[in-house]
Image (cartoon, coloured by chain):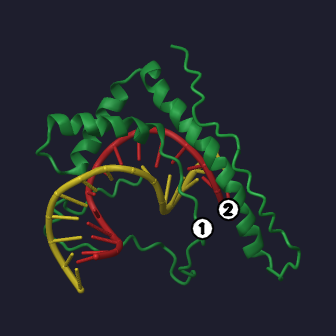
Chain colours: A green, B red, C yellow
Amino acid sequence: MKEAKSKASARGNDSKLAVKNKPAKKAKAVKDPNKPKRPPSAFLVFMEDFRKEYKAKHPNNKAVSVVGKAGGERWKSLSDDEKAPFIAKAEKRKADYEKIMQAYNRKQAGEAEEESDKSKSEVHDDDDDDEEGSDEEDEDDD
DNA sequence: CGTGTGATTGTTCAA
DNA sequence: TTGAACAATCACACG
């Protein structure tokens, strides 16, 4: 929807260092204290590999936009099965993100709510190093 | 020296 | 349900 693609792409002309001003006129420009970064979409995951390949073919190319276009076109060209491995990876990111969200939500609740000093010593510093390192759990059936 | 930008699509959150 | 913004990347320009 937002096809505001106008703005001559010639970035060498307008010094549009202007950041994307949010439509927040009077809203507080305060950003979230610990805004959790969202996991890369399957497309980005796919692009990670694609960029390498693209650079291999176009080492002279330095425009990210070109890779983006090429990547998008290629992405649509892939089949679900081909994208499957990328999507699977994206899902994994989401799993981790879910955990982060818990912390984020917690902070929001505390922020929204008057954060009275909780004398509760919730400093369980018992670090569990052995947290489930569910890192490599590839169940991809090849 | 740091950072914003461009372009792609997907994803995710908030109201 | 919809909107709206943000996720990576990379070289370059500007203050």
The residue where tag 2 is placed is A104
For label 1, the crowd category at 10 Å Cα-Cα, with few meaning under 14, some 14 to 19 and many 20 or more, is few
Q: Residue furthest left?
A: A60
Residue C14 lies, in percent from the top left, at 19, 79
**Labels in figure, total:** 2
The residue where tag 1 is placed is A34
- A27 w.r.t. A109: above or below: below
- A130 w.r.t. A23: above or below: above
Q: Quadrant of residue A35?
A: bottom right
Q: Amino acid at mark 2?
A: Tyr
- A9 w.r.t. A75: above or below: below
Q: Amino acid at mark 1?
A: Asn
**Quick one: A36 or A142, which is closer to the camera?**
A142
Residue A33 lies, in percent from the top left, at 60, 72
Evaluate whether label 1 is on the same chain as label 2: yes
Residue at 52% in and 47% down: A39
For residue A55, side relative to residue A117 (left or right): left
For residue A110, side relative to residue A31 (left or right): right
- A128 w.r.t. A78: above or below: below
Q: Secondary structure at mark 1?
A: loop
Chain letter of the residue beneath label 1 in the structure image: A
The tag earlier along the polypeptide, 1 or 2, is 1
For residue A83, side relative to residue A121 (left or right): left
Report if the CB atoms under discs 1 and 2 are less than 8 Å apart: yes
Residue at 36% in and 29% down: A76
